[in-house]
Image (cartoon, helix red, strand yellow):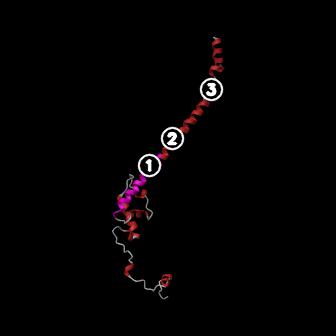
Amino acid sequence: MTTTATTVTSTENTPENTTEPGTGSEETGKTGNAEAAKYRTRLREVETERDTVSERLTGYQRREAERLAADKLSRPGDLWLDGAEVGGLLDDEGRLDEEKVAAAVAGVLDGRPQLEAGRVRPRPDAAQGGSGAPQAPGWGDVLQGRKV
């Protein structure tokens, strides 16, 4: 019976119980770091993809807001003059709110009524009046023999 107890006690220090290269906690640490690095790399890729999709969606929403504003503004891009942002024109579910776009358009037109669509703007016409003052003689007059 004593031999059994001695055998059990001596097996704790046998070469079978020592850590072999490649199977110990040192290898697990290296594997864990590599796995964490892989997840960090994947996370960065997904974040970049998310940002790209978010920018694209914002562009679509911006163009849609301008399309809605085109009925009231001569240049739809003028919607953004008063500092309106796409995020402020969205409803609770993230969709473009037509009432908020209309309110933003009304805000722009309050301060700048000349931007209203369909408004006729006068164009300058040189034939509508004389210059009023006589012109000073130039080299052309001298070369053509006119008195100066």
Measure how far apart labels 3 and 2 are at the Cα level. 30 Å
Amino acid at circle 2: Arg
Q: In percent of the image, x 61 and y 28: which residue is there?
A: 24
Hey, which residue is sitting farthest bottom in the picture?
A: 147
**Residue 59 colored in magenta in the image:** yes
In the image shown, does 85 or 60 lie closer to the viewer?
Answer: 60
Q: Position of residue 64 (x, y in %)?
A: 37, 56
Q: Residues within 10 Å of mark 2 (few under 14, many from 20)?
A: few
**Residue 129 colored in magenta in the image:** no
Q: Which mark is residue 42?
A: 2
| Left or right position of 72 against 25 | left
Give the position of the N terminus as an image quadrant.
top right
Q: Position of residue 53 (x, y in %)?
A: 44, 48
Which residue is labeled 3 in the image?
21
In the image shown, does 133 or 124 lie closer to the viewer?
Answer: 133
Q: Name which of mark 1 and mark 3 comes first in the sequence.
A: 3
Q: Position of residue 33 (x, y in %)?
A: 58, 36
Q: Residues within 10 Å of mark 3 (few under 14, many from 20)?
A: few
Mark 3 residue element: loop
In this picture, which residue range is highlighted in magenta?
A: 49-71
Amino acid at circle 3: Pro
Q: In percent of the image, x 62 and y 20: which residue is there?
A: 16
Measure how far apart labels 2 and 1 are at the Cα level. 17 Å
